[in-house]
């Protein structure tokens, strides 16, 4: 945020969530019943297959709307592509992957913008809707709230291993399935009222699990006791991390966020590093009222989504993370 210091930023009471925090999207109120959720995200390829890259990039962009409790409405393509150097079929496949994921999300492609660029980049600008009184932000967890995670960790390490030609086909398929999976929120039909138990939410992306969890406790109201035994890792992640195939971004995360973290049990530095591994299209982190945690897990299960309890928030360690 230092880059914004000294800038005069416009304010508007209808902007319910803006850049003042570290939330995943902006929220702008339209009326008493509706607010727009707006986000954009794009990045360079993390896999070799252009269609899969399009799917993963699109799923990653939609996560920002889901993590605010919203439902996506429209999406617009953001494309950078070396049009003279690469086969146009590559771009077509990237866009096809994105279009299929947009359709799966129940949204509509409304257009986009492209530039001729030496490095391929793709993503989406997504607009969604949420009720102004049902917005989730990344803070608001309370003492004894349950911490849930919806995707396994390790995609950053596996993408690094793929670039070094270490990753097996089976390991990469498992990782790409997770990365391409939408964090689509369950409907109300199977488990009515499940959303009422959610106090806070964010998605796990570039700052890794511990970085984004640090943002959830940054207001100093609560800390979190993280249960290492409950955290899932993708196949091969520990092996490749132990070989030194740890992304540079993960090392930066560890250096910046580890001041909040205390290890209350013995475990390997490899596993500790994986908790900082920058994720691409990672899962949701949800703080849930303990009385509503079962309903939330049932709702995700009914929608074909995984959700695991990996800890609890605690008022006894405000702003801190303890790993047990």
Image: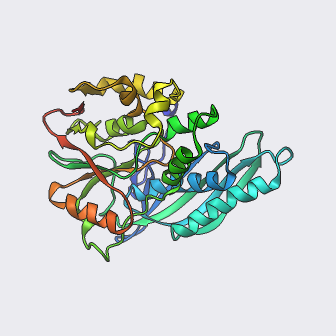
The image's colouring method is rainbow
Question: For this rendering, which residue is in front, 264 or 196?
Answer: 264
* Residue sticking out furthest to the right: 84
- Residue at the location (48% across, 41% down)? 279
- Residue at the location (67% across, 45% down)? 48
**Place of residue 200 in the rendered image (x, y in percent of width and height, measured from the top left):** 29, 51
* Residue sticking out furthest to the bottom: 189
Q: Let me know if residue 258 appears in the view.
A: yes
**Place of residue 16 in the rendered image (x, y in percent of width and height, measured from the top left):** 37, 55
- Residue at the location (14% across, 38% down)? 315
State how many labels appear: 0
Quadrant where the C terminus lies?
Answer: top left
Determine whether, in the image, residue 239 is placed left or right of residue 102: left
Question: For this rendering, which residue is in front, 251 or 270?
Answer: 270
Question: For this rendering, which residue is in front, 108 or 166?
Answer: 166
**Place of residue 290 in the rendered image (x, y in percent of width and height, measured from the top left):** 16, 54
- Residue at the location (45% across, 47% down)? 282
Determine whether, in the image, residue 268 is placed left or right of residue 59: left
Q: Height in image: 241 above or below 158? A: above
**Place of residue 23 in the rendered image (x, y in percent of width and height, measured from the top left):** 40, 46
Q: Height in image: 41 above or below 293? A: above
Question: For this rendering, which residue is in front, 79 or 56?
Answer: 56
Q: Let me know if residue 112 appears in the view.
A: no
């Amino acid at each position: 945020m230092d880059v914004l210091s000294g800038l005069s930023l416009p304010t508007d009471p209808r902007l319910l969530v803006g850049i003042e925090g570290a939330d995943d999207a902006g929220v702008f109120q339209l009326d008493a019943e509706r607010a727009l959720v707006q986000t954009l995200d794009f990045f360079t390829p993390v896999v070799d297959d252009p269609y899969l890259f399009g799917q993963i990039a699109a799923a990653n962009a939609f996560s920002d709307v889901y993590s605010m409790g919203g439902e996506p409405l429209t999406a617009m393509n953001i494309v950078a592509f070396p049009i003279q150097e690469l086969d146009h079929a590559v771009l077509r496949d990237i866009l096809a992957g994105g279009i299929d994921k947009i359709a799966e999300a129940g949204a509509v492609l409304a257009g986009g913008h492209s530039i001729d660029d030496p490095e391929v980049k793709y993503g989406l600008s997504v607009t969604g809707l949420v009720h102004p009184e049902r917005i989730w932000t990344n803070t608001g967890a309370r003492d004894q709230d349950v911490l849930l995670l919806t995707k396994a960790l390790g995609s950053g390490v596996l993408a690094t291993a793929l670039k070094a030609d270490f990753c097996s086909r089976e390991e990469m398929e498992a990782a790409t399935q997770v990365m391409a999976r939408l964090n689509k929120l369950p409907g109300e039909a199977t488990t009515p009222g499940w959303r009422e138990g959610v106090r806070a939410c964010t998605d796990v992306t570039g700052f890794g699990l511990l970085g984004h969890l640090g943002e959830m406790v940054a207001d100093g109201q609560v800390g979190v006791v993280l249960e290492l035994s409950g955290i899932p890792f993708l196949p091969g992640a520990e092996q490749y991390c132990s070989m030194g195939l740890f992304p540079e971004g993960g090392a930066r995360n560890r250096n910046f966020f580890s001041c909040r973290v205390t290890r209350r049990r013995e475990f390997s530095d490899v596993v500790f590093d994986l908790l900082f591994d920058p994720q691409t299209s990672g899962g949701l982190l949800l703080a849930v009222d303990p009385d509503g945690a079962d309903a939330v897990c049932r709702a995700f299960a009914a929608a074909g989504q995984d959700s695991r309890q990996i800890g609890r928030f605690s008022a006894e360690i405000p702003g801190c993370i303890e790993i047990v």
